Each structure stands twice: as structure tokens, then as C-alpha cells.
Amino acid sequence: MTERRKAATRLEIAREAVRLFADRGVAATTADDIAAAAGISQRTLWRYTSSKELCVSPLLTYALDFATALMRSWPRDRSLVEVVAGTPPSLPDAAVDADAKALRDLVLLTRTEPGLRAVWLQVHHDAELVFAEIIAERTGHGPGDLEPRVQATVLNGALRIAVEQWAWSTDAQRTSLSRTLHRALGIARSGLSV
């Protein structure tokens, strides 16, 4: 099976898991339910994930992978600040448009489902390590040095809070995810100069 097909299967499993979790709750949803909804056997499901809560990870990592790829491909002669400040507000939507409802449902569930909240926080923790590595490569620091770790934490925190703000707001308050991300990154960019 190609990596692309495996990624598509993981994403389909994630979509179905979120749909079932939103309809029934995590406790009332079994691995058999998720496997059947995704059109695979339970044995195949366990090849892709080690718990039913972890099934949702691909929905959470999709946009973070997009941000990571953008940061990695950004020209070295241009500051990463330009990625934050200069990226058009509509650009990140390409990474999440197809799954916006599933992502919103999932992030809403992180408020009440501790297992999903743990996955949400773990995905962001893992992304933070990658962001620190990218920043370190660009600045000549080690990824464990204080500067890239703090910068990665600020970036990661802005991304996480933006998605939560978007998902948790009411329809009347909600703007597009890309605009919320862009606004949060602008706030992070300005830092603590208050």
C-alpha cells in the first residue's frame, strides 16, 4: 500500500471516528463501530492506531503538517516572520476546507472528552518539537536551546488557541478558520510588547 493510500485511509478512519464520537460519545463508540464505518476490519484498524481516541490524530495533524511544510519550504533568505505576517488569510483553508465540520466537531469534543483532549494536546506537543527544530535550523541554534523552544511554543500556542477559538465560538461570533489563524499569528508576532 502506498503512503498516499495509507494516509487517505487514516484520514477516513479519523472522519468516521469523529462522526461517531459526535453522534454517540466516545464511551459508546467501539473500535468495531469505527472499523465498520470506515469499511475496514477491526484488525486493520489496529494496524493504523493503538486506541480509538488516537484514530482522530490525522484530522488534527493535517493543518499542522501544512504549516510545517510551509515553514520548511520557506526561503532561507526570508524571515519566518513573513510566513506569519505575510501569508494571505485564505491560504490555510486549503488544508482544512474539506474537513472543517469534522475538525470543529472534534475540537468541540476536546472540551468534554478527556481522551480526545489528551490526543489534541499530544499532537500540539509533537508539532512544537518540529517547529523548534525548523526554527533552530534557520537560526543556528540547537532544537533544545531556549530560543527556538520558546519561539516554537509561541507559534504552536497561537495555532492551537486559534483553532479552539474558531471551533468553540458560536455561529454569530465565528469567522473563517483561516482568518482566525491569521489573527492569532499576528498577535503572536507582536509578542508581549504591550
Image: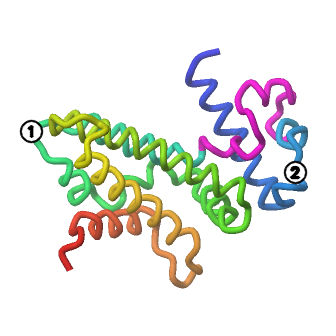
With 25 as the anchor, is 69 left or right in this view?
left
**Which mark, by number, is residue 77?**
1
Residue on which disc 2 sits: 29
Q: Helix or strand or loop: what does disc 1 sit on?
A: loop
The one nearer the camera, 66 or 98, is 66
Magenta-highlighted residues: 37-58
The one nearer the camera, 133 or 93, is 133
Q: Which residue is depicted at the point 65% across and 15% down?
A: 1
- Check the image and name the residue furthest to the top: 1
Query: In the rendered structure, which amino acid carries the disc numbered 1?
Result: Asp
Q: Which residue is depicted at the point 23% across and 68% down?
A: 191
Q: Per the image, is 47 magenta?
A: yes
User: How far across and how far down the image is residue 125, in percent?
Assistant: 48, 47
Relative to 9, residue 37 above or below: below
Crowd tier of the residue under label 2, counting other residues whose Cα lies within 10 Å: few below 14, some 14–19, many 20 or above: some
User: How far across and how far down the image is residue 64, in percent?
Assistant: 45, 46
Q: Helix or strand or loop: what does disc 2 sit on?
A: loop
User: Which secondary structure is most common in the magenta stretch?
Assistant: helix
With 96 as the anchor, is 128 left or right in this view?
left
The figure's colour scheme reads rainbow
Query: In the rendered structure, which amino acid carries the disc numbered 2?
Result: Thr
The one nearer the camera, 35 or 115, is 115
Q: Which residue is depicted at the point 67% across and 46% down?
A: 56
User: How far across and how far down the image is residue 50, in percent?
Assistant: 74, 33
